[in-house]
Image: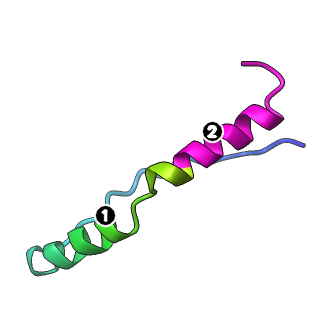
Amino acid sequence: MAVLAKPVNKISIIKRQNSSQFVQEFNTNKVSGEFLDSCKKAANLFAKRK
């Protein structure tokens, strides 16, 4: 199966009055270290090469 991707050349602009809200939401939606570790372990199970 082929996967085709088109690059996106759009830049998001955040207004000054919304910047603090954006930073708060960004920080709460960050991926945790535990989740990254579990993803690495799962990738090792399915990987055919290291």
Residue 25 horizontal/vertical position (percent) = 31, 74
Classify mark 2: helix, strand or loop.
helix
Q: Residue at the spot x=24%, y=73% of the render?
A: 24
Q: Nearer the viewer, residue 38 or 7?
A: 38
- For marks 1 and 2, give the CA distance: 30 Å
Q: Is residue 44 left or right of residue 20?
A: right
Where 6 sits versus 40, above or below? below
Would you say 24 lies left or right of 37 here?
Answer: left
Closer to the camera, 31 or 19?
31
Question: Which residue is at a point 32% across and 67% down the rendered structure image?
Answer: 26
Viewport quadrant of the N terminus: top right
Q: Residues within 10 Å of mark 2 (few under 14, many from 20)?
A: few
Report crowding for label 1: few under 14, some 14 to 19, many 20 or more residues within 10 A (C-alpha).
few
Q: Earlier in the sequence, mark 1 or mark 2?
A: 1
Residue on which disc 1 sits: 12
Residue drawn at 82 percent across, 36 percent down:
46
Q: Name the residue tied to disc 2.
A: 40
Q: Residue furthest front?
A: 34
Which amino acid type is shown beneath numbered disc 1?
Ser
| Numbered badge on residue 42 | none
Amino acid residing under circle 2 = Lys
Total numbered circles: 2
Q: Does residue 33 belong to the magenta stretch?
A: no
Q: Quadrant of residue 40?
A: top right
Camera-side mark, 1 or 2 = 2
Q: Quadrant of residue 32?
A: bottom left
Q: Residue 29, position in %: x, y?
A: 40, 68
Left or right, 5 with respect to 48, comes to left
The C terminus sits in image quarter: top right
Q: Which residues are magenta?
A: 36-50
Tell me the element at label 1.
loop
